[in-house]
Every structure is written in structure tokens, then in C-alpha cells.
Amino acid sequence: MTAPALVVLGAGLSQRPLIRRAKERGLTTCVVDGRTDRPAAADADTFVHQDFSDVPGTIAALAAAGVEALGVCSMGSEQAVVPGARLAEALGLPGLPVTAALAATDKVVQRGLYRDHGVPSAGFAPARSLADALAAYDVLGPRVIIKPTDGAAQRGVSDVQSRDEVASAVEHALRESRSGELIVEEHLSGLEYTVNAFVLGGVFHPVSVTLRELAPAPAVGICVAHRHPCGRSDEEIALIVDVVRRAALAIGIDAAPVYAQVRFGADGPRMIECGARLGGGSDAQLAQLVVGVDLMETVLDAALGLLDGENLAPRAMPEPHGHSRFVIPTAPGRIVRADEGAVRELPGVHDVGFFHHAGQIAPPLWSASGRLGVLLMTAASDAELDARTTHALAALDVIIEPMEPAAAAAAWNDQVAREREGLA
């Protein structure tokens, strides 16, 4: 006997709002994740311990759990995009075309589509070996970015500023690459922006443009806050939006959200990446608060085949200044306490959550996994937003036993491996 349920791929903290929203709509939810100790695992009606990248295995696990999928969705997980499209296709459910999902998650394919469709972006070259990467550096240098083609959350990414650094960057990227394929990209200068949007029936609906505030070196491209308004003029925002619209069209995204990153330098906006998913940094919740568009509701409607696009127009909101502000540990180590305390009672705080909890490891800020949690905040002005955020961060009750970065990274990798095996 089976029971109908919305299938959510991933049980990370970023999935929690989507799961809760689905339940508020009266939907039964089933979460699938290959790790057992995940923040949102207990939020679903049914939890299935299964690596969702194995689509046949996921179908079998859902059947064994007595789950009949009503729809398939995710939030914030780049790794769920292709499995989600394939699972929806296999089950005859609405979903992103598999070809678009593959293009949206393969950096080499995506950059090739940008080039073929005249979308401004960085120069690039694929690489599978050190020799390939060195040859690419000689053309694209003196400063390049080296990363896995199938990576996410800034894992395996290096900012290479000399030829001597290429070998270690290649080794770092290969450790994080599932396919063994890398990309070498021209380094782009300028501030970085995030565009949240939705494509429906071939029509691109821009929702929000936020400034991506990045962690300082040695972190590479790790976002510490998504801030709205983004600080650009209306004309410049229009240019940013148009570049993302062209990128989404080139990739073939339709009936799906867009989460894109753009650099704006002296020669204007240039694409970094265009994902077919909601962002994982509370971007959808922030958009609802500052521009009045509910992207989570839109994604749920799309998964269920109910989307009509009527609610995708931004509108004026009482507190249009806001950000999702990540909580960054002062040092990596074992978490003694990560508690929100009374922070929710403070002005402007809409949500707070922790990616890791007591007893777990807070890894180094070598990828997005090094972020401890996130605050979702709004205010009537930038100055008020900054003041409220300072107060909220000080109110969090966090204690971490510091460890040397290498030791913390090793302990983190061991923890993840145990969780994947269901031993945590």
C-alpha cells in the first residue's frame, strides 16, 4: 500500500523552509538524503535514507517506504538538480528538462553555451590533467580560477595567481570532483551579484538582485551575506538581469527557478554561473520579505504542475532593506553549543538556523560548509539593518572548541563519511 507525498531531495537546513511550507499547504512530505544526521530530516513526515544521486535506488527506496510521489523538488542543493530532473522524468512528473539540468550543473557545458549564444562571461578551458591546466593558464592567466566542473558550495575552488600554484590547485579540485573533470577560468574583477528569477513558458521573470558579500582571502567566492538593495542603479540592474535572462535561455531552463551569479566589472556584467534551483542561503525567504515574491510557493506549484505565474511580479514592501547573513565561526573546531537564544525576539529578525549542531565539527571556511548558520533580517534602511545585525549576532549563544584547520578538516571528513554510512 502506498501513500501520496511530495518528495524533497536533501535534508539540509536550506530544505527546512520548503518542507514546512509544503506541510502548511497540507501536503505529506518525504525527504530523501544519503546522510542520516541532517538538520531537516525530522521535519518531514517520512525520511528515506538513500543517496538521491542514485535515481533507480531512490525509486526503489520510495517504493519500499510506501511513498507515491506527487512531485519532486529541492531547495538550495546543486547536487539535487540533475537527479531531481531524472527522477521526475522517470516518474512521469513535472520537472526541469534533463538536458537543461545537465547544462545548469556542468560548468564546461554551461560556459560553452554562453559562448555559442553570445552571453558575456569569462574565458575558459576544460582540463583533466595538470598539463591541460597549465596550457589553459598560459592562455587565460596570469590570474585564473580552477575548480571541478561538477562542484558546488565552493568546494575544490582555487584562486590561482601564478603558474607555480596550478599544480596544487589541480590536486585540490580533483579531490572534490566526482567526474575527474576540471575547468580553468579567466579571473573576473568587480563586485558579485545574485539574481533570483523564475522561467515559465519561456518567459524570464526577474525577482531580486542582491549583492553577494564575500569572505576575505584565503576563502574563495564564499558568500557571507546576500544584501538587498544591491547598491546598483536601475540601469545597471537591468543590464545584470538581461545577462542572466540570456544565460537561462541558452541553457534551456523552463518551468524552474534561476539562481545566478554575475560579476560587474569595468566592462559591465559578465556571467559566472546560472543554476536551475532556488538558492541555499535563504534567498527565497529574503525575496519574499523585500520584494514580495514567494518563490517557495512557486517551486511547490511547479512540482505539482499547478504553476500559472500570476504571483511573480515584485511589489513594494515595508522593510525593503534586508539580507541573509551567514554566521561565520571565529575558528574551526568541535561545537560545544550553537543556540539561537532569544535572537528571534529582536527587531528585524525573521529566521535563524544552524547548519551544524553541538557535538559536530565546524570545518574551516574552505567551502560553504564552513558557515555555521544563517540569520534572515530586514530593516527600513541600510544603517538600521547593520545595527540590527550586529545586535543579533551578539545575541547568539555559540561556543566552539578551536582546532587547527587541518585537524578540523580531517574530523569533518570523517564525520561526513560516518553520516553517509548511517553511523553517526
Image (spheres, rainbow, N blue to C red):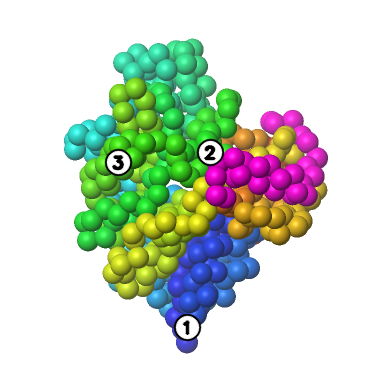
Residue 126 visible (yes or no): no
Q: Where residue 194 sits: x, y (%)?
A: 42, 42
Earlier-in-chain disc, 1 versus 2 = 1
- Residue 99 is left or right of residue 292, and the answer is left
Spot occupied by residue 392 in the image (x, y as percentages of width and height): 70, 48
Residue 43: give x, y in percent of width and height.
Answer: 60, 69
Q: Nearer the viewer, mark 3 or mark 2?
A: 3
Mark 2 belongs to which amino acid?
Cys
Q: In terms of depth relative to the viewer, which is nearer, 53 or 123?
A: 123
The answer to whether residue 386 shows anywhere in this view is: yes
Relative to 133, does residue 90 appear above or below in the rendering? below
In the image, is residue 392 part of the stretch drawn in magenta?
yes
Secondary structure of residue under mark 2:
strand
Residue 238 is marked as 3
In the image, the segment drawn in magenta is 379-407
Say if the magenta span includes residue 262. no
**Structural distance between the alpha carbons of marks 3 and 2:** 23 Å
Quarter residue 267 falls in? top left
Residue occupying image coordinates x 30% and y 67%: 310
Picture quadrant where residue 147 is located: top left
Q: Nearer the viewer, residue 417 or 190?
A: 190
Q: Which residue is mark 2?
A: 223
Name above or below for residue 23 compared with residue 112: below
In this figure, what is the number of numbered marks?
A: 3
Q: Earlier in the sequence, mark 3 or mark 2?
A: 2
Res. 3 mark: 1
Label 1 or label 3, whichever lies nearer to me, is: 3
Q: Dividing the picture into quarters, in which one does residue 362 lie?
A: top right
Q: Amino acid at mark 3?
A: Ala
